[in-house]
Each structure stands twice: as C-alpha cells, then as structure tokens.
Image (cartoon, grey):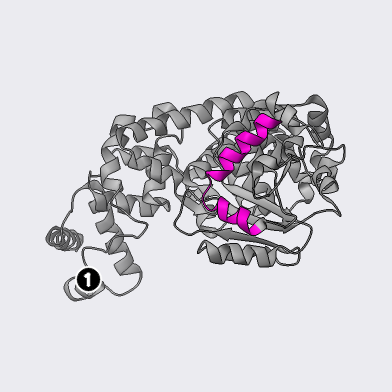
Amino acid sequence: MRVAIDKLSDVLHSSPHFRCLLDLCTNKDAYLVGGAIRDALIGRPLTDLDLILPEDPTALAKEFARKIDGHWFWLDKQRRQSRVVVNGDIDCPNYDFALFRAPDLKRDLLDRDFTINALALPLTKDLSDSTLFDPCHGVEDLQQDSLRMVSDLSFRNDPLRIVKGVRHATGLGLEIESGTLHAMQDEIAGLDCLAVERVRQEIWKIFADVHAARGLQLLHESRAGQQLFGEGFDWSIPELIVNLESCRNKWQYLVDCNPVVSDWLATEIEQGLSNETLLLCTILLASIEPDLPESLAENWLLSRKARTNIAAIVALNIVARNDFAAIALNERAYAWWAARQHIEPKLLLLAMAVVGSPESQPSLAELRAWVPLVANLDDRRPNDLVDGHWLCNKLHLKDGPEMTRALELLRTAEISGQVSSDEEARLFLLEHYQNKD
C-alpha cells in the first residue's frame, strides 16, 4: 500500500491546480474517490477528479474555481453536486464535488459499482501521510486485471452499471469476474427502464474505444448487446468485428495520407457522438438489421442533425456510389453532390470509404485525392452560379417549380464538370432552353 500511496501522490501532484485544492481541503473531511485513483494507479491520464465530503461542498467548489480562475456550475443542485472546469486548458481535468452517498465513507464506497472504483484517498496537506481506503480490495483486483462488482445488488440498484462494466473492461483491459458476469446477465432486463440518454453515452464510449472489438464481444457475453440491439446482435458478432476493423483500417490509411482526416473523425455531431462513432454505429447496426440504425436513433432521442446523417448514410446505395466516380474533381462539384446526399461533406467522404461491399466502394487512392478539396468545405451549400433575377429576365422562368428545375439542371452540370463558372452556367442554360423550344 505504501507504493500505491507514493505513486498516487506523484501523479496527483502533477495534475494542474491539485496543490491549490489540497490547500483548500486542509482541516476538511474531503476525499478523492473512484476513477481518478484507479487511473492514477495504472498510469492513465486523469480526466475527472471526484471529491466527496460529508457536508455541502458547494462553498469549497466555488472558492476553488475562484482561486484557479475556473468556471463553476451545477451538475445536480438538489444533490449538491457541482463541477469546476478551466476553459481552454485541455490538460486540466474536471473537478467534481459531491456529498457522501451514505451516512459515512465506508457505506458510501460499499454503495459503488465495482471494487476498482470503491477507493478513497483523504485529501490531507501531505498525501504521503494519507491512508488509501479500499474496503473491497479494489487495488488487488486492479493488479489482477479483474472487474468485480461491489455487491450482489450492484446491477439491480442501477442496471446502467452493466454497460459501464463492459466499458471499463474494454478500455482498461480487464476480465469480468465470473460472478459479476452472471449477475450482469441476470439483470439485463433493467436496461429497458433506463433513461436513453444514459445508455447511449455508454454505448458510444464503447464503440469509440480503440479496443471496440473486445467491447462488442463483451456486450455479447453480458447479453447487453442482445437486449439493446435485438437477437441478431449475437449471431452477427463475427461479421461486426470484421467490419469494425475494416472501417478503422481504411480510415487510418486516409489519416496516414493526410492527418486532417483524424480531425474529421473526431468532430462531434452532438455531445459524446463523434463522426467516427456515428459511422461505426450506423454501419455495424445496419448489418444486423437495415432499419435498426434509424429506429434506434429515434428511440435514443438523437438530434435532428444526427438522425438526418444516419438516414442518409443508410440510404447510400450502389447508384450513389457509382455516381461518385463521375464527379468533377473540384470543391463546388463535390459540395453539390454532398448536398444531394443530405450528408455533411467530410462525413460523406468518410462514409464512402466504408459503406457497401468492397467491390462497390471507391478505391482509397480515389478518396485520398479528394481529401484536400473536401477539407476546404463547410456544411453550407454553395451559392448557385445564376440567380432568380437572371432566370426570370433571360429565360422568362417563373419563381417556383420552373426555377427549381433549372437550378437542379445547372447543379447536375456542375457536378459532372460541364459547367464551372458564371459565364459557362449562363451559356449552358441559354442553350438548353433554346434547344428545348
């Protein structure tokens, strides 16, 4: 335990503003708990530091925010849970403050999900004098790469812990202890009673993990995958894992050719849902059942933006993929084509690398050529090369369907490369309508 305390002390003191926090906690009954201790012990970056106190911690949190020039806000006012962040400092973890969940520290820890999270460290001025509270032998489980529930009621008390357990085992490389796995399997029906916002965030983290293939296997073993995605999930596991690795390999090729693609993959569509995760979820779930991604997006209350992209990705058929080969190699042509697919330009290029069978996909060399052009595009449609005033005066078209058809005709000509300037657009339309007459 002495080695553990020394290691914890070194890691925590390297975290921004931790010394200030210790100074404020002097003579207070304050404890660091859970994931931060676990991650510090195994050398993982600290993203959140959770503090608990037996009394209302709000004043302490606000004073800490003032001293470090941070931003304080409520997480749950009724439960007196709040957070302090330092905007613009990506190396600074979030600091969360909360009340004990139980009358005393031991019962608080015994009410937690897994032994590796049931750890507490008193925040004294000199951490080397502190004693790590570990009533469930979580450090030993961590050393043995084992994920074990704190009590037989862990999953009944909160079924979300089933999916959180899969996430922990995936990301930390842990084996789920047999009794814990059986308890997960027995309580999966409880997943249907949870707020969908809680479930989807955990699932997205599993899909986003570098070891997501293992996460899929653990969702199968715990039976959570079948409960959330239907019976087809279990017998699709081999195909899902192959498709997952294929997607990531193709995207990695594009990243190696142009690192900007890494930013595209990481771009968030909504909180917790990146382009990469949205694509993986859509493609993998569609291989189980074509309608599953859209129905799940609706049931999980995803944003309109996310639902629109998911529906459009599912609808990318062979015709659309064949049309890609005929697009003129310029930004406007691609932007108009993306607008017709109802998918954001960068997300669409990522999708083109992985949607459909390998025989119908553009080659990675073709896609690589598009990356510098697509990098300059945003989500807005281009302005048309002619406006309604010109269409009315020169072609005598009426506002409405007539003008819409003319503009669609022009956009098609741009996509194919027949037209690339204002002058060419006018000549194209004049010739078309003269021939039509």
Q: Is residue 115 shown left or right of residue 170?
A: right
Chief secondary structure of the magenta portion: helix
What's the residue at 47%, 46% (across, down)? 275
Q: Number of marks in the image?
A: 1
Q: Is residue 219 shown left or right of residue 336?
A: right
Up-down: is 177 above or below 87? above
Amino acid on which disc 1 is placed: Leu
Q: What stretch is highlighted in magenta?
A: 1-24
Name the secondary structure under disc 1: helix
From the image, tell me which residue sits under label 1.
Answer: 391
Is residue 409 or residue 55 the one in the foreground?
Answer: 55
Give x and y (percent) for residue 179.
83, 28
What's the residue at 76%, 51% (across, down)? 194
Give x and y (percent) for residue 267.
44, 49
The answer to which image quadrant residue 103 occupies is: bottom right
Q: Determine if the magenta segment contains residue 182.
A: no
Quadrant placement of the C terminus: bottom left
Give x and y (percent) for residue 235.
67, 26
Q: Is residue 288 shown left or right of residue 342?
A: right
Q: Can residue 410 be seen in this view?
A: yes
